[in-house]
Amino acid sequence: MNEQNKYCPETNLVWAILCTVLCCLPLGIVAIIKATSVERLWREGREYEAQKAADDAKKYSIWGAVAFAVIMILYFALLFIGVFAAAAGY
């Protein structure tokens, strides 16, 4: 074990929970599972797997937030188009 890997990586559990509650349930659940496994893997001496799980938790949280943003943009765009189509008499 080298000096830069002396401490357990950040679990990103807070981001995973926020993603689950506020954004995207399926990706958030995967992120929570990955985040909760980080410390266990680190204690077992599996530093590479712990870092990969932490990175995956962050990745799935970001994907969930981006998916939510894209869906909201599409929703409001279609709503906006529908309102103007109805106002124009189509």
Image (cartoon, rainbow, N blue to C red):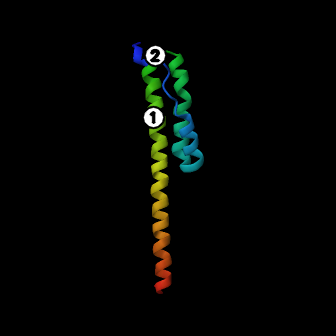
Which residue sits furthest bottom? 89
| Cβ atoms under marks 2 and 1 closer than 8 Å | no
Q: Nearer the viewer, residue 30 or 65?
A: 65
Residue located at (52% from left, 26% from top): 38
Which three-letter amino acid code belongs to the residue tagged 1? Answer: Asp
Residue located at (47% from left, 41% from top): 60
Which three-letter amino acid code belongs to the residue tagged 2? Answer: Lys
Which residue sits furthest front? 4
Q: Secondary structure at mark 2?
A: loop
Q: Horizontal and vertical percent for residue 58?
A: 47, 37
What residue is pinned by disc 2?
6
The N terminus sits in image quarter? top left
What residue is pinned by disc 1?
56
Q: Nearer the viewer, residue 15 or 49?
A: 15
Characterize the local packing of mark 2: few (<14), some (14-19) or many (20 or more) Cα atoms within 10 angstroms: few
Q: Which mark is residue 86?
A: none
Q: Secondary structure at mark 1?
A: helix
Query: Would residue 49 appear left or right of 33 to someone viewing this image?
Result: left
**Mark 2 vs mark 1, CA separation in Å:** 20 Å
Q: Nearer the viewer, residue 27 or 3?
A: 3
Q: Horizontal and vertical percent for residue 34?
A: 51, 32
Q: Compare marks 2 and 1 and give the one earlier in the sequence.
A: 2
Characterize the local packing of mark 1: few (<14), some (14-19) or many (20 or more) Cα atoms within 10 angstroms: many
- Up/down of 34 relative to 76, above or below: above
Q: Nearer the viewer, mark 2 or mark 1?
A: 2
Q: Horizontal and vertical percent for residue 29?
A: 56, 41
Residue located at (46% from left, 61% from top): 73
Q: Horizontal and vertical percent for residue 33?
A: 55, 34
Residue located at (53% from left, 32% from top): 35
